[in-house]
Image (tube, grey):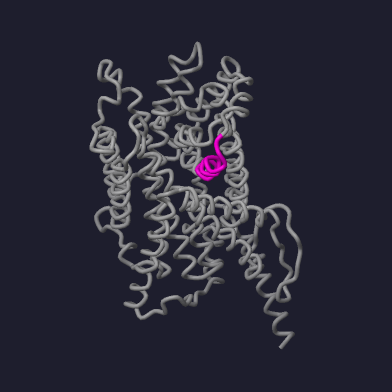
Amino acid sequence: MWGYAAVGADIYTALGIITLAALGLAPLAFLAAGIVFALVGLCYAELASAYPLAGGGQYFTLRGLGDLSGLVAGAALVLDYTIDISLFTVVAFGYFNYFLPWITFGHHITDFTTTIGPIHLAWLWLVESLVGILVLIWLNVRGIKVSTNFNEIIGTIAIVAQTVIVLAGFVLVWKPELVSHEFLFDRPSLSQFAFGSSLAIIAFVGLETISQVAQETRRPATIIPRTSIGLVISVLLFAMAFSVLAVGLVQPTEFRGHEGDPVALIASKIPIIGIVAAPLTAAIGALIVFISANSGVVSSSRLSYSMSQFDLLPAWFSRVSKRFATPARAVVVFGGVALLQTIFAFFTPGPPGKSAAIDVLADLYAFGATTGYLLVFISLFVLRLKDPFTPRPYKMPLNIRMTYKGNQVWFPVLGLLGFLGVLFFLIMVILTHQYARIVGPLWVIAAVVLFMLYRRKRGLPMFKTLPRDWETATKKVLLEAEEFKSLEEYEAALNEHRARMADRR
């Protein structure tokens, strides 16, 4: 349910902006991104169960490709987490503002906007979002404790509500002829579809969350693959169902002005239950999306803490508050970045009645995800070759057996397809996302400069990978995770390898 709160909330955020971009071909955009997402999920299921450490994709990249690549992956993912805080807080209050016409006795949300030249500033929405982020920072500095039961209850309610909306929508009001009409006569241009498809990847971002908590999971060899695959299937089903339902229920242009509450708009169009389902969906959407924003605060501080432990970031980021025993510095820094991103997004020029803020943040979101995932796939290939000794309780299906430096290894065919898919989306992001292709690389360059200055100050080689005892680290992790069988297999594989090397000498 922790994973669902991070990934399942994406459909509440992405449905409107992707449908507006891809028009009648929105289901195909979701499908293309969903297939790549499934392959990414299988990759993470393998790596997180084999290397159950809190660093997630950054740790996999560090171990497979070295310090500089690990830094780039970590920087891209931290960028994603800060945008996660900003974007999901904005969307959470977009759903909350569904109730504004009732709260203000008939005034519409557009009454709370002001025009400053080409900027149409939704000032109330901006203030709400900034306050929401400040609340998340305050809670995480003090040490928020989210109970497992709370996540289970909220996740279950969200799944039930989404299921009711999908089933009622298809049974009561969905029109297949409208789907075919939109598919044939409301097609986007090639560049629009490329933009919509690359944007659709944000509907499936969040798998990092599971790998981030892998270190606290007992028996991750069993739990992580089941969780990851179950999450992939459930999120993919809901994303495809909502995209097909949306195209057969409303005109794509009807989402304009509803980028902040697209699922509530869908629910309001359903007869009989719509009058109740719409406000209920808005309330659930606001809650689950806000929880997802909180996961961005948690993950950014955890990831920066992990990076500082490996000398990729200054130790300053890993300092824990004496009073609250939390990584308060990292929480404040990356929460502050999210505040700046939110202000920048709301002050971006855009047409009236359209949420430029959500468009800008979603534009940026795709860069971090695709960059991080691309490096994780490369790490999968390298670790299969360099580290065939670590037990892999779960392997991606379809592997080709080969010999590498005297060791039997398995090359992942689906991993190659996933790599090509993510590479395609990254190229589309760079070509079609006007903000991401500038801000994303600048963020990574800034991280590299900070890395160089830190390494120079410490007297460490700037770009050389520091020697690390991965064998001891792996044994320790497997022991703490109570994976005793995997630990025995690992030690046996290492002993066999050492015996072969001794015979050759």
Front-lying residue, 354 or 31: 354
Residue 98, relative to residue 143: is it above or below? above
Quadrant into which the C terminus falls: bottom right
Quarter of the view holding residue 29:
top right
490 or 231, nearer to the observer: 231
Residue drawn 47% across the image and 70% down it: 67
Magenta segment: does it hold 134? no
The image shows residue 254 at horizontal and vertical percentages of 45, 24
Callout count: 0
Stretch in magenta = 188-201
x and y percentages locating residue 207 in the rendered image? 52, 48
Which residue shows up at 23% across the image and 32% down it?
114
Report the magenta stretch's main SS.
helix
Q: Is residue 114 left or right of residue 253?
A: left
The foreground one among 358 and 74 is 358
Does the stretch in magenta take in 196? yes
Query: How far from the left and from the top, in percent, is residue 61?
Result: 52, 63
Q: Residue furthest bottom?
A: 505
